[in-house]
Amino acid sequence: EYTASERSSRGGVDFPVSVVLPAGGTGERTGLRTPKQFCTFLGRPLISYTIHAFERVSWIQRIMVVVAKENTELMTDIIQRYQHTKVQTVPGGSTRHRSICNGVLALGEDGEDKRPEVVIIHDAVRPFVEEDFLYKIVMTAKEQGAVGAIRPLVSTVIATTSEGYLDHTLERAKYRASEMPQGFTYDIIYQAYKRCSESDLEFGTECLHLALQYCGTNAKLIEGPPTLWKVTYKRDLAAAEFIIKETLSQSACVITGPSLHAVTLAGALWKAFGTFGMELDVVPDLLGNNSNFLLKENNFIQLSVNSSLSEVEAILWALESSRVLLNSVVVIWVHLRGLDGLAISGTMTEPAPLIMELASAAKPRNVLLFGIQLHQPNDLEQWERSALRVAEITSALIRERNPALVGQLLQA
Amino acid sequence: EYTASERSSRGGVDFPVSVVLPAGGTGERTGLRTPKQFCTFLGRPLISYTIHAFERVSWIQRIMVVVAKENTELMTDIIQRYQHTKVQTVPGGSTRHRSICNGVLALGEDGEDKRPEVVIIHDAVRPFVEEDFLYKIVMTAKEQGAVGAIRPLVSTVIATTSEGYLDHTLERAKYRASEMPQGFTYDIIYQAYKRCSESDLEFGTECLHLALQYCGTNAKLIEGPPTLWKVTYKRDLAAAEFIIKETLSQSACVITGPSLHAVTLAGALWKAFGTFGMELDVVPDLLGNNSNFLLKENNFIQLSVNSSLSEVEAILWALESSRVLLNSVVVIWVHLRGLDGLAISGTMTEPAPLIMELASAAKPRNVLLFGIQLHQPNDLEQWERSALRVAEITSALIRERNPALVGQLLQA
Ligand SMILES: [Mg+2]
Ligand SMILES: [Mg+2]
C-alpha cells in the first residue's frame, strides 16, 4: 500500500471515485451449491475480502454491491459482521449487464453534485486487486474515458465450425483476455447503458464494448498482474485460500519476556525463520510502542519459561480488547521446559489441559492457539537444532491455520 | 479407471498408441527458478504425476519425454526414482514445435512396423488427464486424423490496436480455448512436421493448425474437463497441490484389532467420517485379503488399547516390504487410554518419545506417522463426541499431510 507521500508525489486522486461490484453469480462452475462470492475462506466470505480491497483505499468513496434478491439478507449480514462502512447494496437484474446498469444508476441517484467522477467496475470473485493498480485504472479512466485490465492469453484461441471442427486459430499475439477492474468516467458508463439496446443488456458481456459502440470511446487497455484472475473453478478456491494464507503469514511477532534463555531462543529462531520466508519481530513485551503489534500482527509467538500460560492469557485478553478480528490470529505458546522453578520443586502445573481449554474459548473469537514444548538445550549446537525444529513447527502452524489442531501441545 | 469389461464393451484400443510429452518450459510465469514441471508436490516432481497418468493406461505403449539438455540428468533421475517404465527421453529443440517434432520423429525411428498408429501430444504441466478422456482422444484421432481438447473461454477475448487500445471484442460463443491433449494419426502429425516451414517451427504454437494447413485435416474438437488446465502461475501450484492432496485423502483404512472398545470406536468414527467426505474401510487386521490395503491405501488409522505401538511398527514394516511408496502414506495411531492393563498396573510405557522416534525413521521412506490419544469414554454420548474429535483431527492430518508435524502425539 502507498504511503501518503507516495500518493501525493503522484498527484493523488482528488476527484470522487466509486465502485460497482456485481455479486450475482451462481457458482455453477465450481460445482458447489454456494455461489463462489459467498464461499468462506478461513471463515470469511470471499466477497468480504474483495470489499476490503476497495474499502482500505482512502480515495474510494462508495462501493455499490449489486446482489441477487435471494442473497440480500446474507449480504446485509456480511456487511454488519465484517464492519464494512463504504458499502451500499442494490438489487441485481436478470443478466450481468442489467446488474451493472442498476449499480451505475444507483450511484447517480443522489443528484448530479454527488455523482462520482470515475466508476470502477469489478467482480466480487477477484479479491486480490491492489491499490496501485486501482490508481492506474482510475487515472487512466479520468483521462481517456474508459479503461480495462487485460492479461496475455494462456491458451491459443480457436474458432470452431458449427459441427465442432477447427475452423481457424487466432494469432495469439494480437489478442488479449479482458479482465477486471475496468474504469469509466460516470458520463460515459451512464450514457453507454442509457443508449444500449435490450439485446445488449440481455446477451452482452463486455462494458468496454458498450463504451465503444455507444459513446465512440476506444478503451485504453492496461496489463494487470496475474492475481487479478477470476475465481471460477473449484481449483481456484484452493488457489485463493493459498494466497489468503500466504498474506496472513508473512510475519510473526515473538515475545520473549525478561528471561535470558527465552531471549537466546528468540535469536536462534530469528536465524532459523529466514529459511521459512517469514519475517520475525522480536520484542520483550507488548507494552508501550510494542502494543502496535496487537493492532496489526496476525501471528504471535510467546516464549515462556514457566508452565502457567499467564503470558498467553494476557495476549488473548489484549487482542480481545484492542481489535475486532476479521481474519484469524495465530498465537503459539513456546514453553522452554526445565527452566521452571516450580517444576524443579515438583509442583509444576500440567499445561496440556489448560491450553486446550484456553484454545476452545479463543477459537470462536477467531484466535487459533497452539502450544510447543521443548527441553532446555545443553549447548549452542543443541540450541540451534531446537530453534530450527520450533521454527519448522511454528511456521507450519502459522501457514496452515488449521482450526482442527488448536489446543494441541506439540513437542519440538 | 475402466475395468477390463468396460473397455472391451467399448471396443478397446487395439492399435499402438504412444505419447509425446514436451517438458522444455522454463517456468518464468510462476516466478520460480525451477521450471514448473520439475516443481515438487508432496516431494514428487509434477512431471512424474503427468507421466503416471499415461503409464497407468494399459493401452499406451511409450511416452517420449522431450527434455531440454540442461535437464536431461534430472529427468533420468526422476525416471529411475519413480520407476517409470514406459518413458524414453529425447533432446528438446529451441521452440515448442521443434521439441514436439523431435518427439514425433523419435517415435518413428525403430522402423515402420513399430510406429504407433496414434500419437497423443500433451503438456508436462497438465498432470490430471484421465483415462476416459484419453480414450476419446485416441478413438477420435484414429477416425478423424486429428483431434484436440477445448474448453470454454473464461474471459472475453479482445483485439488490441498497436497503441494499446480496444479494437474489437470477439463474440465469446464462437471461440474456444485450445487445450491439451491432442491426438493425431502418426501419418498426419509426421507429414505436418515434414511439410511445415521453418517459420512455423520457429513461431507457431498450435499443432492442430499445422495438420489443417499441411494435411488438409480439420481437427475434431472435444470439450475436456476443467482439470485439463495448464499449471501456469504460482497460484496454480497451490491448486495442483490441493488436487493431489484431495486425491490422496479420499479414503482411509481403520484397523481395530480384537478389542471391543476399539471396534466400538471404529463404528463411531465411521459415522463421524461421513461429515468429512472421506470413505472408511474398517478391518480387524491387515492379514489375508485385507493385506490388499497395504498395496493401494494411502491412509491407515490404527486403533490401539495399549501404549506399546507394536501394531504401528507392524504396519510400517508391512508397508516397507509390500510396496514402493511413490506418494506419501499417512499412518495415524489412535490410542484409547485407560484400557491398558499395563497402565493400570503402573508400568505403562510413555509413548511420546517412541512415536517421535518411529516417525523420524519413517519420514525418509515417505510414511507420515502421527499419534492421537483419547481417554476411554464413559457413555455413548461421550463416545460420539470423542469419535467426532478423532475424526476431525484425523481428517485434518490426512488432508494436510504436513511433514513438519510427524511424530506428534495429539489429544482428542
Ligand atoms: Mg460475477
Ligand atoms: Mg510446456
Image (cartoon, coloured by chain):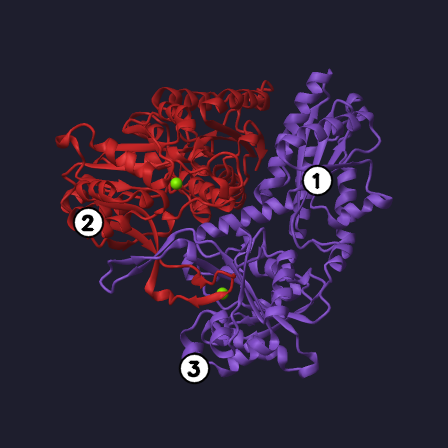
Chain colours: A purple, B red
Give residue A407's position: percent from left, percent from top.
64, 39
The span from disc 3 to disc 2 (Cα, nearest Å) is: 45 Å
Q: Is residue A92 visible?
A: no
Q: Nearer the viewer, residue B346 or A109?
A: A109
Image mark for residue A198: 3
Labels 3 and 1 share a subunit: yes
The picture quadrant where one finds residue B349 is top right
Q: Residues within 10 Å of mark 2 (few under 14, many from 20)?
A: some
Q: Nearer the viewer, residue B215 or A179?
A: B215
Q: Which residue is mark 1?
A: A252
**Amino acid at pointer 1:** Ala
* Mark 1: secondary structure: strand
Residue extending farthest to the right is: A288
User: Which residue is painted at 17% across and 46% down in the image?
Assistant: B142
Q: Chain of mark 2?
A: B
- Quadrant the C terminus of chain A occupies: top right
Q: Which residue is mark 2?
A: B215
Give residue A222's position: percent from left, percent from top.
55, 59
**Amino acid at pointer 3:** Glu
**Residue A237 located left or right of residue B127:** right
* Mark 3: secondary structure: helix
The span from disc 1 to disc 2 (Cα, nearest Å) is: 61 Å
**Residue B384 located left or right of residue B200:** right
| Label 1 beta carbon less than 8 Å to ligand 1 | no
| Label 2 beta carbon less than 8 Å to ligand 2 | no
**Amino acid at pointer 2:** Cys
Give residue A269's position: percent from left, percent from top.
71, 29
Q: Chain of mark 1?
A: A
Q: Image height check: is A367 above or below B367?
A: below
